[in-house]
Image (tube, rainbow, N blue to C red):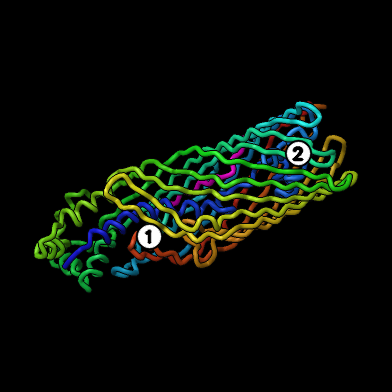
C-alpha cells in the first residue's frame, strides 16, 4: 500500500483553499458587491445615478458630476444594511461511510453590517474645472453560520469589507458635456472560516490507493470510532490589503430635460495575504499518531520502505497548524449607463449596469508551510442590474422618490453553494429629501433586496472529502436604511 506525497499534499493544501476561494462567490453583484454609493440614489433603487447632477453624492459613482450644480458641496452620511437567510436540509459523508452529518440548520447567518459611508466633497475651481473626493464601500457582507451546523464543512463565516477613497477631477468640456476621472484607493478586508474533515480525507485516500477501506476494520477491531468526523479542523483565513484602480465618467445634456451619464470602474488587482489559522477540534497530533485505525497504513508504508511520518503525519500537521497564505484576486470592472428625464416637478430615471464577474474563473492559493499551491475553479457569470425610478417634488422643501430594480446573480444552479446562496434579485426602495435650510438638506432612504429560494447541492470537492449538503436557502433578503446631511454653497 502506498500513499502519494503529491496527492496528499495537493488535497491537504486544498483544505485551506476551500475556505478562501469561495470569497469571490459571495463577492458578487448580488452578494457582496454593493451599489450603495449615494443615499439619494438608493431611494431610486440606484436608477439614474450616473446622470443625476441634483444628487451631490452621485459623484462617487461618476466623477464627472463633481461641481455640476454648486460651487462647493458636501454629503455626510451612509447606509446600514442587514442580510438574512435560512437553510433547511441535511448533509452526508457521501464518499466515505454515507453517514448523516449531525448539527443544526445554521440559524440566520445574516448580521448588521458596519455603516456604508456616503461622503462626497466637491469644489468647483472655475467655470471648467472641479475637484472632489469621495469615500464609499463598494463591497461588504457579514454572514456567520452556527459553528456546529450541518454545513460547517462548506462554510462557517464570511466577512468582507471593501472601502475606497477616490480623489477626482471633472472638466466641463462643452456646454452640454462634462468629463471626469478619479483614482480608486481601496482597502479590502476579508475573513473566512469553515471546518475540514481530515479523517474522511485520510479514509478516502486509503481507498483510492488500495481499492478498499483498510481503516474502518482496524477501528472496529480496536473499538474506536471510525475516521470520518474524528479529526476536524476549523480553518480561518484573515487578510487586509490595499490596491489602486481608477474610474472615469461623462455626463451629456442631450436636451434641456434629458441627460445621459456613463461611468466605468476599472478592475483592481489585490494580492491578498494573511494568517491561515487552523484550530483542531478537541484532538492533538499525538492522538492522531497513536490512533489504531491507522495501524494498517503505517504497516503498509513500512513494508514498502516508505515513511509514515513524512507522507502522512507531517502533512496532517501542516494542514492543521497555523501558517500564512497568499492569493491574487482581480475584482471586476463595472460599466454603468443612466438616463434621467426631468419635467416640472417630476423626474424619471433608469440605469443599466454590467459587472464582469466572469473575469473570476479560478483562484490560486499559496501557503508558507508544507501545504502545496492549489488552484480552485470559480466559474462566475457576469451580472447585470436594470433599474427604474421616479422622483416628485411635493413642495419647495420636500421631495419623494421610489425605485424598482432587478439584478442577475453571478452563480447559477450548477455553481450555487452554501458559500454563495445567491440568486437573481428584486430591489424596492423609497426616499425622502427635506431642504431644511437654504444650504442644508436631509436625505433619507429605505429599501429591500429580495432574492429567490435557492436550491443547493453542494459538494466539498476542494477538500477531497466529497461531503454533500442538500437543501434550500430561503430567499436571501437585504434590508437597508440610509441617511445623510447635504451642504451646498
Mark before the other along the chain sequence, 1 or 2: 2
Badge 1 marks a residue whose secondary structure is loop
- In the rendered image, which quarter is residue 150 located in? bottom left
Nearest the eye: 90 or 69? 69
Say if 369 sits above or below 106 in the image: above
Residue 237 is inside the magenta segment:
no
- In the rendered image, which quarter is residue 39 located in? top right
- In the rendered image, which quarter is residue 394 located in? top right
Where residue 340 appears, as percent x and y from the top left, is 80, 48
Name, please, the residue furthest toward the front: 173
Position of residue 27 in the picture relative to residue 464 (left or right): right
Nearest the eye: 300 or 419? 300
Which region shows up in magenta? 135-146
| Residue in view at x 57 percent, y 63 percent | 453
Q: Which residue is mark 1?
A: 462
| Residue in view at x 61 percent, y 36 percent | 183
Where residue 474 appears, as percent x and y from the top left, is 55, 60
Image quarter of the C terminus: top right
Image quarter of the N terminus: bottom left
Say if 230 sits above or below 324 in the image: below
Nearest the eye: 386 or 456? 386
Position of residue 432 in the picture relative to residue 471 (left or right): right
Q: Which residue is mark 2?
A: 55
Amino acid at each position: 500500500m502506498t500513499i502519494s506525497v503529491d496527492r496528499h499534499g495537493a488535497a491537504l493544501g486544498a483544505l485551506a483553499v476551500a475556505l478562501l476561494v469561495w470569497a469571490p462567490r459571495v463577492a458578487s453583484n448580488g452578494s457582496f458587491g454593493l451599489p450603495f454609493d449615494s443615499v439619494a440614489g438608493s431611494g431610486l433603487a440606484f436608477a439614474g445615478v450616473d446622470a443625476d447632477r441634483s444628487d451631490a453624492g452621485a459623484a462617487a459613482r461618476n466623477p464627472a458630476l463633481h461641481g455640476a450644480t454648486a460651487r462647493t458641496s458636501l454629503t455626510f452620511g451612509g447606509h446600514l444594511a442587514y442580510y438574512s437567510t435560512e437553510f433547511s436540509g441535511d448533509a452526508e459523508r457521501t464518499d466515505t461511510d454515507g453517514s448523516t452529518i449531525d448539527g443544526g440548520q445554521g440559524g440566520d447567518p445574516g448580521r448588521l453590517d458596519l455603516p456604508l459611508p456616503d461622503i462626497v466633497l466637491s469644489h468647483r475651481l472655475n467655470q471648467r474645472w472641479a475637484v472632489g473626493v469621495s469615500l464609499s464601500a463598494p463591497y461588504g457582507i457579514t454572514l456567520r453560520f452556527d459553528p456546529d451546523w450541518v454545513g460547517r464543512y462548506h462554510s462557517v463565516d464570511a466577512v468582507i469589507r471593501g472601502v475606497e477613497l477616490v480623489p477626482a477631477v471633472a472638466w466641463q468640456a462643452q456646454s452640454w458635456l462634462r468629463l471626469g476621472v478619479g483614482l480608486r484607493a481601496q482597502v479590502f478586508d476579508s475573513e473566512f472560516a469553515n471546518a475540514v474533515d481530515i479523517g474522511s480525507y485520510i479514509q478516502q485516500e486509503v481507498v483510492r490507493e488500495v481499492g478498499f477501506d483498510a481503516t474502518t476494520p482496524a477501528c472496529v477491531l480496536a473499538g474506536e470510532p471510525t475516521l470520518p468526523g474524528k479529526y476536524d479542523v476549523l480553518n480561518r483565513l484573515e487578510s487586509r490589503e490595499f490596491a489602486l484602480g481608477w474610474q472615469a465618467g461623462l455626463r451629456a445634456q442631450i436636451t434641456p430635460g434629458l441627460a445621459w451619464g456613463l461611468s466605468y470602474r476599472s478592475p483592481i488587482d489585490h494580492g491578498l495575504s494573511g494568517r491561515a489559522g487552523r484550530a483542531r477540534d478537541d484532538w492533538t497530533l499525538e492522538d492522531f499518531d497513536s490512533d489504531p485505525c491507522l495501524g494498517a497504513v503505517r504497516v503498509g508504508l513500512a513494508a514498502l520502505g516508505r515513511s509514515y511520518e513524512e507522507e502522512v503525519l507531517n502533512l496532517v500537521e501542516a494542514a492543521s497548524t497555523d501558517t500564512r497564505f497568499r492569493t491574487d484576486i482581480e475584482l471586476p470592472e463595472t460599466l454603468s449607463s443612466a438616463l434621467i428625464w426631468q419635467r416640472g416637478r417630476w423626474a424619471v430615471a433608469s440605469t443599466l449596469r454590467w459587472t464582469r464577474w466572469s473575469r473570476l474563473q479560478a483562484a490560486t492559493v499559496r501557503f508558507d508551510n508544507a501545504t502545496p499551491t492549489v488552484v480552485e475553479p470559480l466559474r462566475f457569470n457576469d451580472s447585470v442590474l436594470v433599474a427604474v425610478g421616479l422622483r416628485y417634488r411635493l413642495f419647495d422643501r420636500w421631495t419623494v422618490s421610489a425605485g424598482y430594480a432587478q439584478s442577475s446573480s453571478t452563480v447559477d444552479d450548477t455553481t450555487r453553494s452554501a458559500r454563495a446562496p445567491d440568486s437573481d434579485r428584486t430591489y424596492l426602495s423609497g426616499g425622502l429629501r427635506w431642504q431644511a435650510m437654504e444650504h442644508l438638506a436631509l436625505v433619507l432612504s429605505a429599501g429591500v433586496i429580495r432574492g429567490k429560494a435557492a436550491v443547493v447541492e453542494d459538494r466539498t470537492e476542494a477538500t477531497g472529502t466529497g461531503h454533500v449538503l442538500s437543501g434550500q436557502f430561503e430567499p436571501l433578503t437585504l434590508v437597508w436604511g440610509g441617511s445623510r446631511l447635504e451642504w451646498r454653497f
